[in-house]
Image (tube, grey):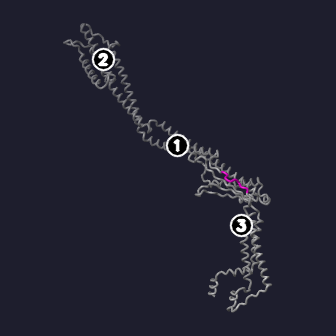
Amino acid sequence: MLEELEEKNSETFNIHQYWAIIRRRHWFFLIPLFLGWFAVWGASWLMPSVYRSGTLILVEQPTVPQQYVTPNVSDNLQDRLQSITQQILSRTRLLHIIQQLNLYSAESQRSNPDQLVERMQKDIEIELAKSTTGQQLTSFKVYYSSPDPNVAQQVTRQLTDLFISENLEVRQQQSQETTKFLESQLEEARKTLADQEQKVRDFKDQHLGELPGQLQGNLQILGGLQSQLQSEDDALFSAKQQNSYLQSLIQQYRSSQRSTKGGDGTPMGLPAIDDKLEKLRAQLSDLESHYTDRHPDVRKVKEQIAETEKMKEHLEANLKANAAHPQADVPPTPGDTDLTSPIAQLQNQLEANKIEIANRERAIAELKTKIGAGQAHLNQEPVREQELSELTRGYEQSQANYDDLLKKKNESELATSMELRQQGEHFQILDPPSLPTTPFSPNRLKLCGIGLFAGLVLGAVFTGGAELMDDRLYSEKDLKELINADVISEIPNIITPDEDKSRRRILQVEMASAVLVFALIAAGYAFSYFRG
């Protein structure tokens, strides 16, 4: 049994055998073939024709380069287009178009508005087209299908207008909202910056003289105060010396008025004055070697020398007068009553000197107070520096945030102006909505091919079934399979003239029927091609 099965599988395909089967069962093949094809083909013509109108919308880039004006709208065009599509395909928008163009009038009586909107959403198709790299959306197509080609074109035109206007409106709205948001953030940043500025200003006003930036100035002021203090100390020391000198002069002058002549006629008291003059002249010589004549110390010593010389001359004059009247009593001290006398002048100078000493001492006290305050400021400078650094850090952060927001706000205003002038990214109709001349569906040519395939399958099924149900033998092979014996001889088929005519007639009918079936199928193909 296994050997016989292997022998059957090893047999080659016998086309003559199948051709004989087709000739015997041609009606079982041709009739199902034609009926199957005709059923599908006829059904395709019973289906209503649907026309589809389409338009191509190009995504135009901004006319102003991005290096000059940066758009403030989301750069993801595909997401924005999806959002716009959802808005356009919303119930409100589509229901308005349905009512305006009286779409689906035959179904409006038995369908509610939601069903009509769902039907229209199925009739709308959006196809995206990207660049060669597949990264950027360059264009998209909008299609609408309808039994009426004019209606399909009108609806496609309205959908196209909605896409263009909605894109402009969405971009302008997003741009304006971005600008408003930046303006509000900028106002808050400005208030924060003003608060920080006020805190820094109050801190500087409160701690004036203790700020880090005033360190060098404080050092210079403190150095100047110390120099003034040194000058005041020197001046006080000189004033005190002057006070001692004036007191000694007044004492010597009064004592010289009561003095008498010596044995050699030399007046007493003059040596002390001469000694004083020599010291003053030596001091003047030393000062002139270091300073000019306009120096205060040089001028003061010169005044002292002049006063001492005047007092010496006055003393010598008194002594000569006393020597000329030896019997007269000692006159009263004229310096005590005469304001023009040398002793009165010396007393006036002494009073002025006392006032100067008091002023110097008061000025020294004030300078010491200022120096103490300046040193206190210097001691507080590290603490104030740390406190000011913390305030300044917050101020600098607020300033940087304000500057950044101000820059973004200005750029956003430029982008908004560009969007309002429709110079940003926008949609442009490249191919206007077409008026379809041939139906988009059903595809009758395709259905015709499907019908032909279905007819071939039906014909093969019917032919094979009839052949399997027939128990007659038609070949030597079938006979060998039935009986286990060899064929010794074969009687040829004897055909009479009438039988030969009948066979020819049958063959002609078979050929004619086959030609007719395939001619009808070809005619159906041609009709579907030119009319479908």
Q: How many labels does the image show?
A: 3
Q: Label 2 belongs to which residue?
A: 306
Residue 178 percent across, percent down from the top left: 61, 47
Give the amino acid at mark 3.
Lys
Residue 114 visible in the displayed image: no
Callout 3–callout 1 Cβ contact below 8 Å: no
Q: Nearer the viewer, residue 32 or 516?
A: 516
Image coordinates for residue 201, horizontal then vertical, percent: 50, 38
Q: Tell me if label 1 and label 2 are in contact, CB under 8 Å.
A: no
The residues tagged by marks 3 and 2 sit, at their Cα atoms, a distance apart of 141 Å
Disc 1: CA contacts within 10 A as few (<14), some (14-19) or many (>=20): some
Between disc 3 and disc 2, the foreground one is: 3
Q: Which of marks 1 and 2 is nearer the N terminus?
A: 2
Foreground mark, 1 or 2, reads 1
Indicate the amino acid at tag 2: Ala
- Indicate the quadrant where residue 346 lies: top left
- Dot 1 falls on a residue whose secondary structure is helix
- Classify mark 2: helix, strand or loop: helix
Asked whether residue 432 is drawn in magenta, I would say yes
Q: Which amino acid does label 1 sit on?
A: Gln
Q: Which of 85 and 243 is in front in this view?
A: 85
Q: Residue reaching furthest front?
A: 497
Disc 3: which residue: 446
Judge depth for marks 3 and 1 and give the one in front. 3
Residue pointed to by mark 1: 399
- Determine the image quadrant of residue 217: top left
Q: Which part of the image, by quadrant, shows the N terminus? A: bottom right
Q: Distance between the residues labelled 3 and 1?
A: 72 Å
